[in-house]
Amino acid sequence: MKYTGTTFRPPFEANSLLLQVTTGCSHNKCSFCTMYRDTPFSVESMEQIEKDLAEARAFAPRARRVFLENGDPFALSAGKLEEIALKIHEYLPDVQTIAMYASINNIRGKTDEELVRLRGLGINELNVGLESGLDEALELMNKGYDSREALYELGRLRDAGMDYGANVIFGGAGPGRLRDNAAATAEILNRTTPYLIFTGTIHADPGCPLYDDIQSGRFIEPTIGEHIDEEELFLELLELDNCLYFGLHPSNVVRMQGWLPRDKEAMLYEVRQTRTRLARRLDERPVRYGEGAILL
Ligand code: SF4
């Protein structure tokens, strides 16, 4: 299988067949992101995709789930995605779901009819880097859309029958706006009903604008206590059925996962217990290492 440059997948796609159809990310401008800074966006040739599928058929002929690489393959035109999906079904007839990273801007480029057609071909459970429902946070993170557009596009996706998983970043609006950030993000999720929420906290590695802003003091990271407060309020406000809350990213203060609504109270208990356990450190700003992991 061919993989070019840096390749990422969400942790919950560990058992999926990873098929590269693009390299890099078509946006590549989020202020906190260094994932594809050195990998220009390009589209893989159908010839190579077919070669990879032939190889995949030899070692995983009964594969049921494919995750398309890389940063936002949903940027491809509906026609191209249809061509890829048909090829996948030709080589791997047991595939039920074709998932991938997608952005709000990618959805905007597809008509309602195209979304329905793609869903019919098994394209589903898109992993959308929504990050926040608060305009100031979206602007700070340079996501390229506002909350109104995100709500509209996610609504169209859901109307087409597609499920989506939302990535959420606590602290994206900076300290002082954590309650607004939690409330606005919970509201957009409650209205667009993701099947999964993948949480993390705002952090940056060298090589992205946010890193420079943190170093120069233009952006102040929230404290450990503020991250806990934001997650508590966010969880309290979520009203979702059958949604996996995946909070195991190393950048989180509280690392936990559970199903909503079943485990909501247990997770809130975990958040409050963490506040008690870290009582002396709540005013500290996180000290981080690889992948934004917080030294606790
Ligand atoms: S966060 Fe996602 S959309 Fe933003 S630059 Fe990184 S890969 Fe691209």
Image (spheres, helix red, strand yellow):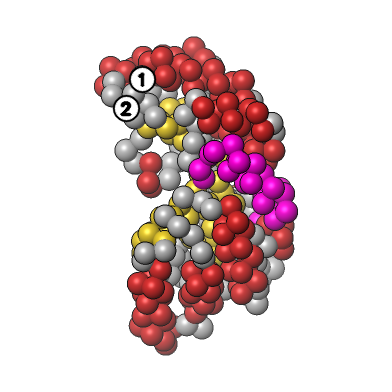
| Residue at 72% from the left image edge and 63% from the top image edge | 136
From where the camera sits, is residue 209 visible? no
Q: Is residue 266 left or right of residue 145?
A: left
User: How many labels sit on residues?
Assistant: 2
Q: Is residue 256 above or below residue 105?
A: below
Residue at the spot x=61%, y=73% of the render?
Answer: 178
Marks 1 and 2 close (CB-CB < 8 Å): yes
Q: Position of residue 64 (x, y in %)?
A: 34, 30
SS state under label 2? loop
State the image coordinates of residue 7 (x, y, percent, origin top left): 46, 37
Residue 270, position as x, y percentages in the image: 36, 74
Closer to us: 234 or 220: 234
Answer whether residue 56 is magenta in the image. Answer: no
The local crowd at label 2, few if under 14, some if 14 to 19, many if 20 or more residues have their Cα within 10 Å, is: some
In three-dimensional space, the C-alpha distance between marks 1 and 2, rounded to whole angstroms, equals: 7 Å
In the picture of the structure, the residue carrying the numbered disc 1 is 92
Q: Amino acid at mark 1?
A: Leu
Front-most of residues 70 and 98: 98
Q: Is residue 151 magenta?
A: yes
In the rendered image, the vertical position of residue 126 relative to residue 3, given as above or below: below
The magenta region covers 140-164
Answer whether residue 9 is visible to the viewer in this image: yes
**Closer to us: 208 or 259:** 259
Give the position of the N terminus as an image quadrant.
top left
**Which residue position holds label 2?**
63
Q: Say what secondary structure mark 1 lies in.
A: loop
